[in-house]
């Protein structure tokens, strides 16, 4: 059960919060005395502290500082009376997770609590995993504990044993090539070559001779016979990357090879037979390409015998702590740094960012942060620009997955404030006027969203 400590000198609030939060299924400890609260924090394994700002025995800010000295990662939500926004700014600077103004909306408080505890648990998970990656969560070089990835591991195992053609789809950076290699290296063909061709990188004629090879003198520059990738992959696996980019003419040729398992080199007449397992990858939805007339339907059915779809990272956020742990370990040892941790705030940014470039983008961000960070701790400013400002990268897909409406609204708010600041050259009075809010509220939001120039 998750345990929350509530500290407030007003006993009424303790009673109300205890009732509200117990009903939500939390174990609730309460005390009106901050000194006693610090004792509890020392001795009890808590998940969250909620504290009042103004208390006679100890100021809320001082209390927050003492909590952070003892347990730097334990989230603290501050309750402030309306109109003490400066104090809230200070509390956020000193590491409070969030603040809520009294009198509060029950729903808002419950949401904030859930968010704080989730983030704390994910951070703890990340710490725990950094130096002890569980083998269950790893298949070859592929990392993943989410249900979606565990399912993909099972698919890879099943399909590896066979010779079946596999189609792998997914956005850029989701690990398509990694999965293709995992299939090959877990198959009976593992001692034979894994040959990869990027169908999007070469002009049509070049790609044809790349795939099927050519005879001497078959075209200008063909000074000797050359084997194509199909031949080179004999006995092994041929990985056709970005297959959606193949021209219609080549699609026909590929279809024939898939049907008959034989072909001729460019400019040649001899029929060559090969034993090749085909794995194709596409970052486009091939069904759409068929509708648009750029991809042959018959070829699609030949390739799509088994389909593995890699979901974007934003749809499997529970893999993030593990991936961060994995890349931290990889790059600290590669770069030769000692143990490195991700700070609470940096972790929160990483978790909330939608990662349009998926795992590749995450990996690059961690590598960069490992290089830049000092004193063994990654802070938000070690992360790429895109994570500095919360941005407006949203569509309905995100809304239906992991992102909560308050989060979306916060991102929109932050982005509008950022734009106002840029537009007014960071003259806060002007920006506040543009946004129709007071300057002190603007200052608070600038701190909250880290929008200083
Ligand atoms: N589940 C994962 N665990 C660990 N590393 C991963 C995972 N998925 C991807 N990566 C890493 O992310 C990077 C991108 O992966 P990969 O090249 O396989 O993506 P892709 O889907 O082929 O992308 P593209 O469509 O841009 O070619 C690689 O460095 C890979 O090692
Ligand atoms: Mg790729």
Image (spheres, helix red, strand yellow):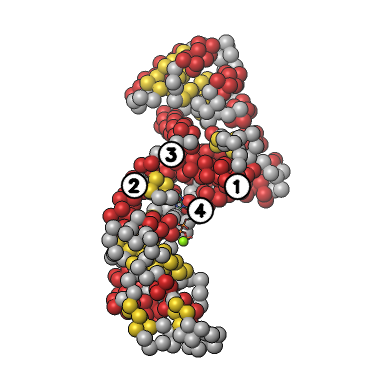
- Of the numbered discs 1 and 2, the one sitting upstream in the chain is 2
Instruction: Check disc 2 and report its element: helix, strand or loop.
Output: helix
- The residue carrying mark 2 is 150
346 and 18: which one is in front? 346
Spatial CA distance of label 1 from label 3 is 22 Å
Q: Residue at x 49, y 17 (%)?
A: 41
- The residue carrying mark 1 is 368
- Of the numbered discs 1 and 4, the one sitting upstream in the chain is 4
- Of the numbered discs 2 and 4, the one sitting upstream in the chain is 2
Mark 1 touching mark 2, by CB under 8 A?
Answer: no
- Give above or below for 127 relative to 233: above
The CB of the residue at mark 4 lies under 8 Å from ligand 1: yes
172 and 98: which one is in front? 172
Q: Do we see residue 335 in this rendering?
A: yes
Mark 2 touching mark 4, by CB under 8 A?
Answer: no
- The residue carrying mark 3 is 133
| Crowd rating for badge 2 (residues with CA inside 10 Å; few <14, some 14–19, many 20+) | some
**Where does residue 120 sit, x and y in percent of width and height?**
47, 31
- The residue carrying mark 4 is 360
**Where does residue 119 sit, x and y in percent of width and height?**
46, 34
């Amino acid at each position: 059960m998750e345990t929350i400590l509530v500290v407030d000198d007003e006993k009424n609030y303790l009673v109300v919060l205890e009732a509200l939060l117990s009903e939500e299924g939390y174990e609730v400890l309460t005390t009106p005395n901050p000194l006693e609260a610090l004792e509890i924090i020392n001795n009890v394994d808590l998940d969250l502290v909620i504290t009042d700002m103004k208390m006679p025995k100890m100021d809320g800010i001082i209390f927050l500082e003492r909590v952070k000295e003892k347990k730097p990662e334990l989230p603290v939500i501050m309750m402030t009376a309306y109109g003490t926004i400066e104090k809230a700014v200070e509390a956020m600077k000193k590491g409070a997770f969030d603040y809520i103004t009294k009198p509060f909306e029950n729903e808002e408080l419950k949401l904030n609590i859930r968010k704080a505890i989730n983030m704390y648990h994910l951070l703890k998970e990340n710490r725990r995993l950094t130096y002890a990656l569980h083998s269950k969560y790893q298949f070859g070089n592929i990392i993943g504990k989410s249900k979606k990835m565990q399912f993909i591991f099972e698919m890879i195992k099943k399909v590896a044993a066979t010779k079946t053609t596999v189609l792998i789809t997914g956005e850029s950076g989701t690990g398509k090539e990694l999965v293709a290699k995992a299939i090959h290296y877990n198959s009976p063909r593992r001692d034979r070559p894994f040959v990869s061709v990027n169908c999007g990188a070469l002009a049509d004629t070049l790609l044809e001779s790349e795939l099927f090879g050519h005879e001497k003198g078959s075209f200008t520059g063909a000074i000797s016979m050359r084997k194509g990738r199909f031949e080179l992959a004999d006995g092994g696996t041929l990985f056709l990357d970005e297959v959606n980019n193949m021209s219609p003419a080549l699609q026909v040729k590929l279809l024939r090879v898939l049907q008959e398992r034989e072909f001729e080199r460019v400019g040649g007449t001899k029929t060559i037979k090969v034993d090749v397992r085909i794995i194709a990858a596409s970052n486009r939805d091939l069904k759409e390409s068929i509708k648009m007339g750029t991809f042959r339907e018959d070829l699609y059915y030949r390739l799509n015998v088994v389909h593995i779809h890699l979901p974007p990272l934003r749809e499997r956020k529970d893999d993030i702590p593990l991936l961060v742990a994995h890349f931290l370990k990889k790059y600290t040892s590669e770069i030769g740094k000692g143990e490195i941790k991700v700070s609470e705030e940096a972790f929160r940014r990483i978790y909330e960012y939608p990662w349009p470039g998926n795992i590749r983008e995450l990996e690059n961000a961690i590598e960069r942060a490992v290089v830049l960070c000092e004193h063994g701790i990654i802070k938000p400013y070690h992360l790429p620009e895109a994570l500095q400002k919360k941005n407006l990268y949203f569509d309905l897909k995100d809304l239906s997955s992991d992102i909560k409406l308050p989060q979306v609204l916060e991102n929109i708010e932050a982005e509008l404030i950022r734009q106002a600041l840029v537009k007014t050259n960071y003259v806060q009075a002007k920006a506040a006027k543009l946004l129709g809010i007071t300057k002190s509220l603007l200052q608070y939001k600038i701190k909250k969203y880290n929008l200083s120039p």
